[in-house]
Image (cartoon, rainbow, N blue to C red):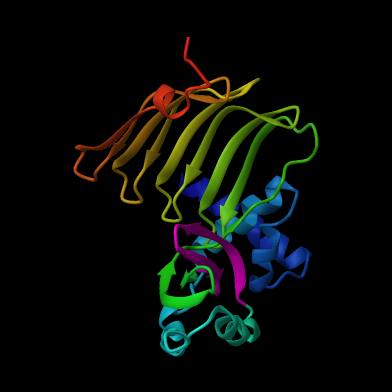
Amino acid sequence: MRLNRFILGLAVFCVLIVHDTSWCDLRQELSSHAQHHRDLAAAQLRVSYSPPDPTRWNSVLAKIKKMKTREEVNKFIEPLGAELQGGIGSGGTGSEMYRLDDISMLTIYYRVPGFSMIDAKLSEKIKSVWVKPPENYTGEWVTYFVNGEVNQRSEYKNGTLHGKTLQFHSNGKRSVVQNYREHGIDGESVSYYPTGELSSRSFYKEGKPVGTWVWYKKDGSIDKLDRQEKINPWFKSK
């Protein structure tokens, strides 16, 4: 085991020297379409990555909390390089999420219509780097978080997910375990909390939800049950 780690570390060092790659460029290598380049960069990042200090955004949050409108907020955060990640809405409220850096997320809550601001919050969610497999790719495809931990490990057949797919939390623990066949996700899908406890169990047949889905609390007790045929009456399990 020690010998394997030494060889992998030596390989990373050689790649850096040959290609005149700085440590910062390891991040760019995570976007490479060459799997071995991503693997080598991730191995080094797991040792050398240092996350940004999330407290540096506290003063920004304090200023945003004093603002009244979406327009005012957008004008303020644009120079910060914040990246809009998406938004959700329900009833008379909505929210938009922005990535501030590798780990910090900003969520703004609004009243709609009108987009008057209700609140703003910071949270931590480490950035992942997705790389699309080549067309008709067959084999294992692995992508990573910016800290070098595995984000997703999937099996492909002719460019389509086929076999087991594993998703991970940024701390290295499993997040989701799924299986895919010719017609999409199939069988049991299991998710886990970042601390390792079972979070949910759901079921699919040829890409469609079936059976009873179960959500769990961290102590293992059942939090919620949903019968899919009741939620999705157009699909009946066989």
Q: Position of residue 231 (x, y in %)?
A: 43, 29
Magenta span: chief secondary structure? strand
Residue that protrudes farthest toward the right in the picture: 135
Q: Position of residue 97 (x, y in %)?
A: 52, 67
Q: Is residue 74 above or below residue 223?
A: below
* Residue 158 image-quadrant placement: top right
Residue that protrudes farthest toward the top in the picture: 238
At x 73%, y 41%, the residue is 133
Q: Position of residue 136 (x, y in %)?
A: 79, 31
Q: Is residue 76 above or below residue 215?
A: below
Q: Is residue 58 above or below residue 36?
A: below
* Residue 18 image-quadrant placement: bottom right
At x 70%, y 53%, the residue is 37
At x 64%, y 71%, the residue is 23
Q: Position of residue 218 (x, y in %)?
A: 24, 45
Left-right relation of 10 to 214: right
Q: Along the line of sight, which residue is nearer the eye, 139 or 128?
A: 128
Q: Along the line of sight, which residue is nearer the eye, 9 or 126?
A: 126
Q: Is residue 97 magenta?
A: yes
User: For the image shown, how many numbered marks are present on the structure?
Assistant: 0
* Residue 211 image-quadrant placement: top left
Q: Is residue 168 above or below residue 85?
A: above
* Magenta span of residues: 82-103
